[in-house]
Image (spheres, grey):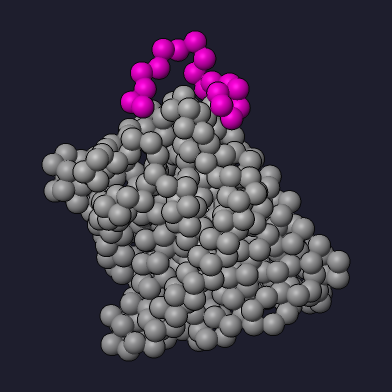
């Protein structure tokens, strides 16, 4: 095996290994979301988290991948839908990629390795919605929306940023998906929550939020450990090549941001709630991971610590903010993925360092230094443009799709079913059959 073929082989192993780690994050989401919800809805949460990846696979294969990465115009991919005209590359012989997905020609791994890696990211965006609309949405309605997000919502904005679209041409950077994955999932979740309304009993007559505790914080904690572990596939894997300098740097920035966010979220929770709330601590970790996802390859290790500290504070404040607006999010998905997806995207414009990015060999030619690096606003302006543009499109599309589903199928289960639990009403089975469950409503 010559040097070129060996490099392709190593790159392929790395890309697939990290894709498997991201796939494993589905387990983490299932554990976190079910643990933070009540026992009477555990089967429903688990069923949604399990089937959503199957839906993602089908919808992204049929339509989503082509819309996202197919050659087309600045707004959408037009070629390679259903892989009708896409050609696999042949890296083992050193042949150049000749298919219609030229936005991915920069990585030399086999075509289906590229596809699978992108698929697991699409599945993550869909999974984010599950927890935010938990404990009151119809199972069938959620499944229909999952098809829509994977087939048309996620791929369109993904094309703008990763598929060679208009935001990419303007110099917008999102290395591993603070906007592409997390904010998109967050905006979709927000639209769903607003149309669904809060859970019964969540808000008192005076408007104050009433705590509805999750039934298994041990499960939720294990889930966050799984997600923290899986993120070392999410961010370092986005190199899509076995680049030692880049992988090491990104692993370090990813871990440090998560750790610092845990600490700052713990402190902020202690200050505001008088005791350190475990759910805030757990979501603090996830907030740091989401926030560092966009800038992980473009910032110094020290900057990643600052990003994590801010993310941990932001997630706690966001939980109180959404509760004040009576936006009921059972697992804190908006505070983690939306608030910190936006912050992480803007963090590129604040902390990006061209020297750091060039040193580890990431593509940073069009990147400008961040505001806190040399005082220029250029990159921050482009990042803000991306945040606003993606928010506008996703909210309009999500409201339209949720609205159609509401008219045709209905969104919310009946009051009696919500009070009794979705496990029996929607699935006819209990998660803890034979156990005496003390419900807090």
In the picture, the quarter occupied by the C terminus is top left
Image position of 136 (left or right of 112): left
Image position of 402 (left or right of 276): right
Query: Does residue 15 appear in this view?
Result: no
> Which residue is drawn at the image coordinates 34% and 44% (left, top)?
282
> Which residue is drawn at the image coordinates 20% and 47% (left, top)?
269
Count of labels in the image: 0
Instruction: Give above or below for 294 relative to 325.
Output: below
* Towards the viewer: 171 or 139: 139
Q: Position of residue 267 (x, y in %)?
A: 18, 49
> Which residue is drawn at the image coordinates 81% and 62% (left, top)?
82
Instruction: Give above or below for 421 relative to 411.
Output: above
Q: Quadrant of residue 68?
A: bottom right
Instruction: Give above or below for 281 relative to 322.
Output: above
Image position of 397 (left or right of 87): left
Q: Position of residue 36 (x, y in %)?
A: 39, 36
In the picture, the quarter occupied by the N terminus is bottom right
- Residue projecting furthest to the right: 84
* Towards the viewer: 98 or 441: 441
Q: Position of residue 315 (x, y in %)?
A: 31, 55
Please provide the residue range marked out in magenta: 424-441
In the rendered structure, does residue 16 fall within the stretch colored magenta?
Answer: no
Image position of 208 (left or right of 337): left
Q: Main secondary structure of the magenta part?
A: loop
* Towards the viewer: 121 or 397: 397
Query: Does residue 62 appear in this view?
Result: yes
Q: Position of residue 161 (x, y in %)?
A: 56, 74
> Which residue is drawn at the image coordinates 44% and 75% (left, top)?
388
């Amino acid at each position: 095996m010559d040097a070129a073929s060996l490099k392709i082989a190593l790159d392929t192993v790395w890309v697939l290994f990290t894709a498997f780690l991201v796939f494993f994050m589905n387990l983490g989401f299932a554990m976190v979301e079910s643990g933070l919800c009540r026992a009477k809805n555990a089967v429903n949460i688990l069923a949604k988290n399990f089937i959503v990846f199957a839906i993602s696979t089908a919808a992204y294969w049929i339509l989503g991948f082509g819309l996202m990465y197919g050659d087309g115009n600045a707004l959408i991919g037009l070629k390679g839908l259903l892989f009708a005209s896409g050609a696999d590359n042949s890296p083992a012989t050193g042949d150049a990629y000749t298919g219609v997905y030229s936005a991915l020609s920069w990585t030399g791994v086999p075509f289906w390795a590229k596809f699978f890696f992108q698929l697991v990211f699409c599945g993550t965006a869909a999974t984010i919605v599950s927890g935010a609309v938990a404990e009151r949405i119809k199972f069938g309605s959620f499944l229909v929306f999952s098809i829509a997000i994977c087939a048309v919502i996620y791929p369109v904005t993904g094309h703008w940023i990763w598929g060679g679209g208009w935001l990419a041409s303007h110099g917008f950077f999102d290395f591993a998906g603070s906007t592409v994955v997390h904010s998109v999932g967050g905006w979709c979740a927000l639209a769903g929550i607003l149309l669904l309304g809060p859970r019964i009993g969540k808000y008192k007559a005076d408007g104050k939020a009433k705590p509805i505790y999750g039934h298994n914080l041990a499960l939720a904690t294990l889930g966050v450990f799984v997600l923290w572990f899986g993120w070392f596939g999410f961010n370092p894997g986005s190199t899509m090549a076995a680049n030692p300098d880049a992988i090491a740097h990104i692993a370090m920035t990813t871990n440090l941001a998560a750790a610092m966010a845990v600490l700052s979220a713990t402190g902020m929770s202690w200050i505001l709630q008088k005791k350190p709330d475990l759910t805030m601590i757990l979501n603090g970790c996830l907030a740091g991971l989401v926030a560092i996802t966009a800038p992980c390859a473009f910032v110094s290790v020290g900057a990643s610590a600052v990003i994590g500290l801010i993310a941990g504070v932001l997630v706690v404040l966001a939980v109180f903010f959404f509760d004040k607006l009576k936006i009921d999010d059972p697992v804190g998905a908006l505070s983690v993925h939306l608030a910190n997806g936006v912050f992480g995207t803007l963090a590129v414009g604040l902390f990006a360092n061209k020297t750091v990015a060039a040193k580890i060999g990431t593509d940073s030619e069009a990147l400008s230094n961040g505001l806190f690096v040399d005082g220029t606003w250029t990159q921050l302006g482009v990042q803000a443009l991306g945040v606003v543009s993606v928010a506008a499109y996703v909210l309009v599309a999500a409201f339209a799709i949720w609205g159609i589903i509401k008219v045709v199928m209905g969104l919310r289960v009946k009051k009696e079913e919500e009070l009794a639990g979705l496990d029996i009403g929607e699935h006819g089975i209990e998660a803890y059959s034979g156990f005496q469950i003390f419900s807090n409503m």
